[in-house]
Image: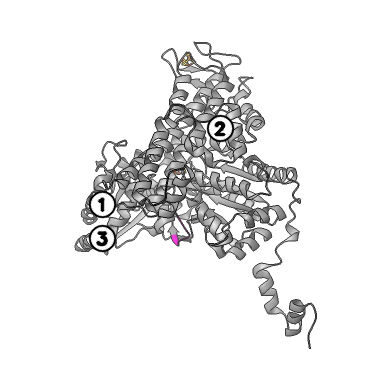
Amino acid sequence: MAKDKRDYEDFSIDPAAQEMLSRADKLGVDTAFSRADELSPCNIGGAGMCCKICGMGPCRLTKDGQTGVCGATIDTIQARNFIRAIAAGAAAHSDHGRDLAFTLKAVANDETEGYYIRDVAKLRIVAASYGINIEKRSPEEIANDLADLYISQFGQQRGKVACVIRAPKNRQKLWEDQGVMPRGVDREIVESLHRTHIGDDQDPEHILRHAIRTALSDGWGGSLIATDISDILFGTPAPILGQANLGVLKEDMVNVVVHGHEPTLSQMVVAASQDPEIIEYAKAAGAKGVNLSGICCTANEILMRQGIPAAGNFLHQELAILTGAVEAMVVDVQCIMQALVKLAEKFHTKVITTSPKVKIKGAVHIEFDEHRALTIAKQILRTAIDNYKNRGDIQIPKAVEDLIPGFSHEYINYMLGGTYRASFRPLNDAIMTGRIRGVAAIVGCNNPRSKQDYLHTYVTKELLKNDVLIVETGCGAIASAKLGLMLGESGLDQVGPGLKEICETIGIPPVLHMGSCVDNSRILTVLTQMVEEGGLGNDIDQIPAVGLAPEWMSEKALSIGTYCVASGAYVIFGGSSPISGMPDRVSDSDIVLRYISEGWEKLYGGKMEFIADPDEMIRRTLAHIDKKRSELGLPAYNPEKFGKSGDRKILAFEKMSIEEQRASLYGFAAH
Ligand code: SF4
Ligand code: MSK
């Protein structure tokens, strides 16, 4: 056992996680939590001060003014490391979008099994926004053209990625003026790799300018395409009741956990699990049926659309297997720990890889192909059912919370104004009056180097008390769900007076679950619609809004943060900075850090900062929101002004005498 091993309460605030970590110790198995304690991070690589781009290195710059063998300075090395991470993150999101574009093409041409176009209205709106003819054409014809347009965005060499027309006009002009308009998704990612090869771009600011362009090709390209097509094929999310945490696993059913990111397979597994033939097969195996749940963003995809429960976020993937009750963990792409296979060997769980891009030694590989999607989904479920008889000792934590996910930007628009006057006006008005102080998007991963869910939920709760409306995606959303912040009444006692009134009036939870990591594109759309609605400036950087990734760990998070900055947002990352440098040892090692903050703010109005202390994150978030309010000429935030309407008014009214009620209604006591 490591010398400075943390207690279970230090590993996670989630009682289900604490219970499973205790079980792991009893069974003598390790997890990401214990491995994080065993394995100290490298303080040179962790600070972005190591270059291993060529065979003359690796060069570790630990002394003041030191350079690599080729003469590369610390700021060049940090900028190169940073853009490479952003390129990898953008590639992951965008390849996800590309696969969906090919699926849409196949569905349009009747080449798939089990898929169809579920949201024809969204298909028509999206297609029309690009000038695709939608009149007197079948959904399949329109989808075929939209798929061709979207597929072409990846390999496009000139011009601009089509989706950028959905950004505010002023923002598009700024990108043109700065020379960062993304031309094609693949082109920007490839150029990032070319520029950072030995002997290429060595001006850190010049490298970081291309980081902006690369990230924009993700946020306003690959990710936005992924979200659009997922909605068209699987339905645009609307509020639905769901559940979260390991307590969603069932003792008497075959538990299948889908994990990863792409909805294409998981949606089909959902369909297959409800097939009478599969239910009968499960019953014949002695189970009551198949119980499906999700981990990470695959969880978010099926939770948002079908209400399929989320077993947990990133750090729950091993914990789910530790219950002993999971017959199969079906994975596709991204955020899948290799450790799952070794851990699963201690139990009966089968880890099933399904993507042609992802194999793990020791896992069962059942390759997914959308042309035979339903057949493959049933094969996967039969494999899980056949494994039910091998189940040994199980321990399923009781922890489970209800939640209402499903707040797509389309639904937010509708909920604020109804079918005939859907609008962001009420939201803008609430911010303008100060009833809502501002908006925060809290997104991103879990990281075993911090206490699981603690930073997410601490920051979320403190901002809610300050009347900041919160939207969430990814593992951050699942953290809030597990804490019960995504269900109206249970969350509202933790909310400031003005925001509470809004939540009660509209009937929404104070934290809105907007989906998976690629669905951060929905947040960009919401911000654009807020600009277009008027009253909050004429570009995203003027809105009192902040983005936070308190427990980030993936390269995708860095890409998301960068495209949000390029779109005008202030973005705060928690945990450690990958480009912190060591100021006590290398005097010029904060050039990159200063550039992505002050430098980017001058150019794009948004900035990126890494802040480890959660109270400082909150302080800077509120300071930024208040600064933006003041710049817009909005009244300063004053919580005393609000909180006297809504449910409190009704409760006070009920306690009054008849005379008092009359006086309150008519302004005088009628006789
Ligand atoms: Fe060292 Fe330069 Fe090669 Fe990097 S590119 S490993 S700094 S020699
Ligand atoms: S799954 S990228 S751990 S949010 Fe999107 Fe969660 Fe981060 Fe993966």
Q: Is residue 17 left or right of residue 468?
A: left
Camera-near label (3 vs 2) is 3
Residue 461 at what x, y percent from top left? 60, 53
N-terminal of the pair, mark 1 or mark 2, is 1
Does 408 lie within the magenta span? no
Quarter of the figure with the C terminus: bottom right
Q: Determine whether label 1 and label 2 are within 8 Å by CB.
A: no
Identity of the amino acid at label 3? Answer: Asp
Q: In this view, does 34 lie above or below 137?
A: above
**Within the image, what quadrant is residue 397 found in?**
bottom left
3D distance between C-alphas at marks 3 and 2? 48 Å
The answer to the question of whether label 3 and label 2 lie on touching residues, with beta carbons closer than 8 A, is no
User: Which numbered disc flags the more N-terminal residue, 1 or 3?
Assistant: 3
Q: Give the range drawn in magenta.
A: 237-242
310 relative to 106 in the view: left or right? right
Q: Classify mark 1: helix, strand or loop.
A: helix
Q: Residue 372 versus residue 418: which sits nearer the camera? A: 418
Dot 3, crowdedness within 10 Å: few (<14), some or many (≥20)?
few
In the rendered image, which quarter is residue 278 located in? bottom left
Spatial CA distance of label 1 from label 3 is 10 Å
Q: Mark 1 points at which residue?
A: 374
Q: What residue type is labelled 1?
A: Leu
In depth, the one of 636 and 293 nearer the eye is 636
Left or right: 96, with 624 as reference point: left
Give residue 517's position: percent from left, percent from top: 46, 44
Q: Distance between the residues labelled 1 and 2?
A: 43 Å
The residue where tag 2 is placed is 577
Q: Specify the label residue 275 is tagged with.
A: 3
Q: Position of residue 27 (x, y in %)?
A: 34, 48
Q: Which of marks 3 and 2 is nearer the N terminus?
A: 3
Q: Is residue 168 above or below residue 591?
A: below
Mark nearest the camera among 1 and 2 is 1
